Amino acid sequence: MKRKSLTAKRSVETALEFANHEGFEALSMRKLAGLPNVTAMPLYNYVAGKDALLELMLGKVVAEIDSPTIGGDWEVMMRWCAHSLRQVLLRHRWTSTLLISRFSLSVTVMRNIDAIVGCLVAGGFTYAQADWARNAIDSHVYGYTIQELNFPVEPDQYKAAAAQFLPMNSQANYPYMYEAASEIIAGTYNRMTNFDFGLELVLSGLQQWQTNSAYAGR
Amino acid sequence: MKRKSLTAKRSVETALEFANHEGFEALSMRKLAGLPNVTAMPLYNYVAGKDALLELMLGKVVAEIDSPTIGGDWEVMMRWCAHSLRQVLLRHRWTSTLLISRFSLSVTVMRNIDAIVGCLVAGGFTYAQADWARNAIDSHVYGYTIQELNFPVEPDQYKAAAAQFLPMNSQANYPYMYEAASEIIAGTYNRMTNFDFGLELVLSGLQQWQTNSAYAGR
DNA sequence: ACCTGAACACCGTTCAAGT
DNA sequence: ACCTGAACACCGTTCAAGT
């Protein structure tokens, strides 16, 4: 039995590596069974099925997400945690949508949520406020990162893409995008560091909300 | 040729309806071919393949998203557009992740982006600021809505879920979630209207950012 | 007890053969 | 010209047959 669970663990790890390396779409039970070739399926002895395998893979990923220290400055902590979550999603590019669509309250996830809510409550938010705040931060992290991961042009190619865009699209049809592309080409801005911009918008909004709110104290 | 494109259009429409009704996972070329049964594939005469079909389906969905009027109050407009996008995503529950992962600059999408950037620029933002602002709003809408669509418990069952949670999880292990669940049961708050909370956080942050910024004018 | 390979029920896609 | 059904290369999953 101990060997069994060990082989299961190793299966999950190779599956994770495969997904990170070859892309999630390419991952199939048959390919995984004997990674060189072989059609046979001893995999099913260790893992209930593809669903279960995915669950285990996500469990490993989720464990990489940092939790805040309760009692620390909530704003610093939330900023830290948001970046941690973001880095995990970037590290395992196939993860983000699956993590949401297969969301489950495992022990790891519960501990993380508990710590975040705790950190916010210790920072002076009510439970309701903490829940809303957590949700707003998560929304930004997931929304931004999923878009980023799927954006068709790489950050260092924005200029080139804009230069290609300009002659193809008339100023008459898309006057504002035309101007924006011109500014990108001129180097006025570069689309970078947008993640932190949005995050700080949310965080400073939360801070003001807290100080303005009469019911902020515990 | 006219008949051909008409049949293509009808195919896309039935595919859309099928996805909305039966769920996107259940959609397959074979099922779609002759919706009652039939294994044959005259579908390929009208549509290049599943990828092309998806593209066409998403095109129809994207057309439902409202664009702002340039010159109107940017904050009112952005709020309106965010809600419009959100409603479209809720109406076609399978759409959100696909819309991001298959993002493409169709004419419809370009017009929408151009109008949003234009509305923000007309409202006093620079092009760079407009781009950041748009991205922050989109991130919230997508991030929040994708999470909501995949959340395992329905809004009207939060109380029941919390009541089930309480006895199963010790106060010692998850003290804060325990307390939060208690408050949900007591009816102190209900997790609703979170979407607008996060959206207003972003919008008011943008407004303050604009008024505080020395370079805000055109 | 464990691994194997054939088998089943599905996919997307192609294409020769019919009408 | 259009539709048909068999075929190919893939899936996830099961299971009798081997060792």
Image (cartoon, coloured by chain):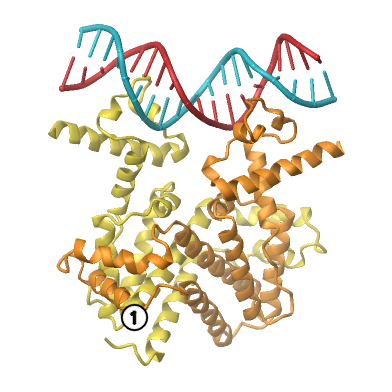
Chain colours: A yellow, B orange, C red, D cyan
Q: Nearer the viewer, residue A149 or B40?
A: B40
Residue B27 percent location from the top left of the image: 57, 40
Residue B61 percent location from the top left of the image: 66, 55
Q: Is residue A188 visible?
A: no
Tell me what residue is drawn at x 63 percent, y 67 percent: B84
Residue topped by disc 1: B188
**Amino acid, disc 1:** Thr
Residue A84 percent location from the top left of the image: 34, 61
Tell me what residue is drawn at x 83 percent, y 64 percent: A172
Location of residue B36 by image quarter: top right
Q: Nearer the viewer, residue A90 or A137?
A: A137
Q: Is residue A206 left or right of residue B81?
A: left
Q: Is residue B23 left or right of residue A30?
A: right
The numbered mark 1 sits on a residue in which chain?
Answer: B
Height in image: B77 above or below A102? below
Furthest residue in direction front, as rendered: B36
Height in image: A71 above or below B149? below
